[in-house]
């Protein structure tokens, strides 16, 4: 007998099932995700937590005419499988395969793309207003997690939507965790809502008692007038102009479908609050939700994760180093927007909890909060993924650089990040921040340079400093060494040669060094410089290079437009040196998902591409 899931090619097929078949379909769907992600790793926990919710929404609403907008989108695996991508789901996050996030060009069911948090309400409101202006009868849903609700953009959207009277349903998926445990006043508020059993029991009984919509509306008005007495405080969402429903068990698919059917007939902005369990239905993922957010490969039967050995990760070099520095310097504090485990600030958090701050998914606040700490004499290390740092551009300029405050920005995941794809590549930080006065921008070639750059950034007299380093494991250097200050704006010469100079910055220097060694074995000797600093540039070194070489090849794990290559070309042009600059890095297009090795080859700054480029230049 064929499984139910094998019969579902589109949501139209799903809607042919009886309500009684939906629990069995949900079980099959969950098992399919567990099996697929065990061999092809992805964001497991979040997607397991919304299986029933996803089935219910597609069952009740007329997708793709009705629009589902997923916040962040890493929880959309069940959505993808139900919307025609079951057969291609084995290519999820793979090179040339489907994206791990919603993507408009991939499917008409992906109403809005995205991989960053807190976007769904604003995007959904725009689509709801567009439908109204165009005279289209359409249901619009924003599915947002309680973690994403800590981002300021979510409240900008809620504030606007509540006043707009748009036909919008915000589905609040409350699982108490984004990657690490959620923090802050909003988290505490949601806990109070979910634990107000008296109010929610009363509301559900009244709602179920009256089936007539007119009577329900009258009762709803009565409930609103008694709510403050029951909760002893106003409901935040209703204060913003939303009608609040819930909380519901997000795994009770029968209750979900009934409630969603009822909400279809209520106009205006609404919030449906559902309680889910991240990793639901897979015991290892339920018991250790942080590690199973994106666990890598594992045995689906035993739950045993495959070992990931090798050299130290850059994030752990940061995590251990900041603990060492903080022990010696009592002014050091650590800040992260909801990624303590991902960036390894959790190491300091465990040992010095009073000096570490997880501010929630709020990059703008993280930067200005750091500026306030610095203005009061502290030395904040603000760790934000490069891709997410884009969201705090104004704060870096206005609140930190303009005031020349000693904030140390640690940009994890700088450059290509691999399977997370275009929404997560740290491609733009060097190009974006190079133009900002007072800001020092550094990128280490290996673990030892990262350690020493972190040490240097906290020394007295330093201004704002940005240190960017890649995702993944380092070069295998022994970095547990004594601290040594780094000369600001000074490059290192790694190899000496004639005719051609290779200038690299950051981890891309590893590929460049390998290519230069390979050329030397063929008796082609070129110079190689690890520039280390994008700002300030080593102008003395560049003067020498401009006078001695006629071809320079720049290599960077970042956008070629505006990055190291552009800075070097600008310098040579200003000095009127007749030097040809060949730039290797991330080209002027969005790079999709794949392994880092595959993407470096596509962008032509892997070892082989650098070797071929320099060889061609040498033959000219």
Image (cartoon, helix red, strand yellow):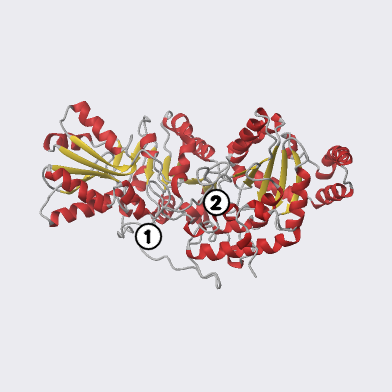
Inspect this view and state whether residue 464 appears.
yes
Most foreground residue, 259 or 130: 130
Left or right: 148 in relation to 345: right
Of badges 1 and 2, nearer the viewer stands: 2
Give SS at disc 1: loop
Inspect this view and state whether residue 382 appears.
no
The Cα–Cα distance between marks 1 and 2, rounded to whole angstroms, is: 27 Å
The furthest residue to the bottom: 302
Q: Residues within 10 Å of mark 2 (few under 14, many from 20)?
A: many
Most foreground residue, 173 or 476: 173
Residue 146 in percent (x, y) is at: 64, 47
Task: Please give the label number shown on residue 199.
Answer: none
Residue 592 in percent (x, y) is at: 42, 47
> CB under 8 Å between callouts 1 and 2?
no
For the C terminus, which image quadrant?
top left
Classify 373 as above or below 176. Answer: above
Left or right: 579 in relation to 198: left
Q: Earlier in the sequence, mark 1 or mark 2?
A: 2
Residue 153 in percent (x, y) is at: 58, 36
Give SS at disc 2: loop
For the N terminus, which image quadrant?
bottom right
Residue 460 in percent (x, y) is at: 37, 39
Most foreground residue, 138 or 566: 138
Left or right: 281 in relation to 343: right
Q: Residues within 10 Å of mark 1 (few under 14, many from 20)?
A: some
Most foreground residue, 407 or 423: 423
Task: Please give the label number shown on residue 74.
Answer: 2
**What residue sits right under mark 1 in the picture?**
312
Classify 510 as above or below 212. Answer: below
Q: Residue placed at 78% from the left, 45% from the top?
A: 262
């Amino acid at each position: 007998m064929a499984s139910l899931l094998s019969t579902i090619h589109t949501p139209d097929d799903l809607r042919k099932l009886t309500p009684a078949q939906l629990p069995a379909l949900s079980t099959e769907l969950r098992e399919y995700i567990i099996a697929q992600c065990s061999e092809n790793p992805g964001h497991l926990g979040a997607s397991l937590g919304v299986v029933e919710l996803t089935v219910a929404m597609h069952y009740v609403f007329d997708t793709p005419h009705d629009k589902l907008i997923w916040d962040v989108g890493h929880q959309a695996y069940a959505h993808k499988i139900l919307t025609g991508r079951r057969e291609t789901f084995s290519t999820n996050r793979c090179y040339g395969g489907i994206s791990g996030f919603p993507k408009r060009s991939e499917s008409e069911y992906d109403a809005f793309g995205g991989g960053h948090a807190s976007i769904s309400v604003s995007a959904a409101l725009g689509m709801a207003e567009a439908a109204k202006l165009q005279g289209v009868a359409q249901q619009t849903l924003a599915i947002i997690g309680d973690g994403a609700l800590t981002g300021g953009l979510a409240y900008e959207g809620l504030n606007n939507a509540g006043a707009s009277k748009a036909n919008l349903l915000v589905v609040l998926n409350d699982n108490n965790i984004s990657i690490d445990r959620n923090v802050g006043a909003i988290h505490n508020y949601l806990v109070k809502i979910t634990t107000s059993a008296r109010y929610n029991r009363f509301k559900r009984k009244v709602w179920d008692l009256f089936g007539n919509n007119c009577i329900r509306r009258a009762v709803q008005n009565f409930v609103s007038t008694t709510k403050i007495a029951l909760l002893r405080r106003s409901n935040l969402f209703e204060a913003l102009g939303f009608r609040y429903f819930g909380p519901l068990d997000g795994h009770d698919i029968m209750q979900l479908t009934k409630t969603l059917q009822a909400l279809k007939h209520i106009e205006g902005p609404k919030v449906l609050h559902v309680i889910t369990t991240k990793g639901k239905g897979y015991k290892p993922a339920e018991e250790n939700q942080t590690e199973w957010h994106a666990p890598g490969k594992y045995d689906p039967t035993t739950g045993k994760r495959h070992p990931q050995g090798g050299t130290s990760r850059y994030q752990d070099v940061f995590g251990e180093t900041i603990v060492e520095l903080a022990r010696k310097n009592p002014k050091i504090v650590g800040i992260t927007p909801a990624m303590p485990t991902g960036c390894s600030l959790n190491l300091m958090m465990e040992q010095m909890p009073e000096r570490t701050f997880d501010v929630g998914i709020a990059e703008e606040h993280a930067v200005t909060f750091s500026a306030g700490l610095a203005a009061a004499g502290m030395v904040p290390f603000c760790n934000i993924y490069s891709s997410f740092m884009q969201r705090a551009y104004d704060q870096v300029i206005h609140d930190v650089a303009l005031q020349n405050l000693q904030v140390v920005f640690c940009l994890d995941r700088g450059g290509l990040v691999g399977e997370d794809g275009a929404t997560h590549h740290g491609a733009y930080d060097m190009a974006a921040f190079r133009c900002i006065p007072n800001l020092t921008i550094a990128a280490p070639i290996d673990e030892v340079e990262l350690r020493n750059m972190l040490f240097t950034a906290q020394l007295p007299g330093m201004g704002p400093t940005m240190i960017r380093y890649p995702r993944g494991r380092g070069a295998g250097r022994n970095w547990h060494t004594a601290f040594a200050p780094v000369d600001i704006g000074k490059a290192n010469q790694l190899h000496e040669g004639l005719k051609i100079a290779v200038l690299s910055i950051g981890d891309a220097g590893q590929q460049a060094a390998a290519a230069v060694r390979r050329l030397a074995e063929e008796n082609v000797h070129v110079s190689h410089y690890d520039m280390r600093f994008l700002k300030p540039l080593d102008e003395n070194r560049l003067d020498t290079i401009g006078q001695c070489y006629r071809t320079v090849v720049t290599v960077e794990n970042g956008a070629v437009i505006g990055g190291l290559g552009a800075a070097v070309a600008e310098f040579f042009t200003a000095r009127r040196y007749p030097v040809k600059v060949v730039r290797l890095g991330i080209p002027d297009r969005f790079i999709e998902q794949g392994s880092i090795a595959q993407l470096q080859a596509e962008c032509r700054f892997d070892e082989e591409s650098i070797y071929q480029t320099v060889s061609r230049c040498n033959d000219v």
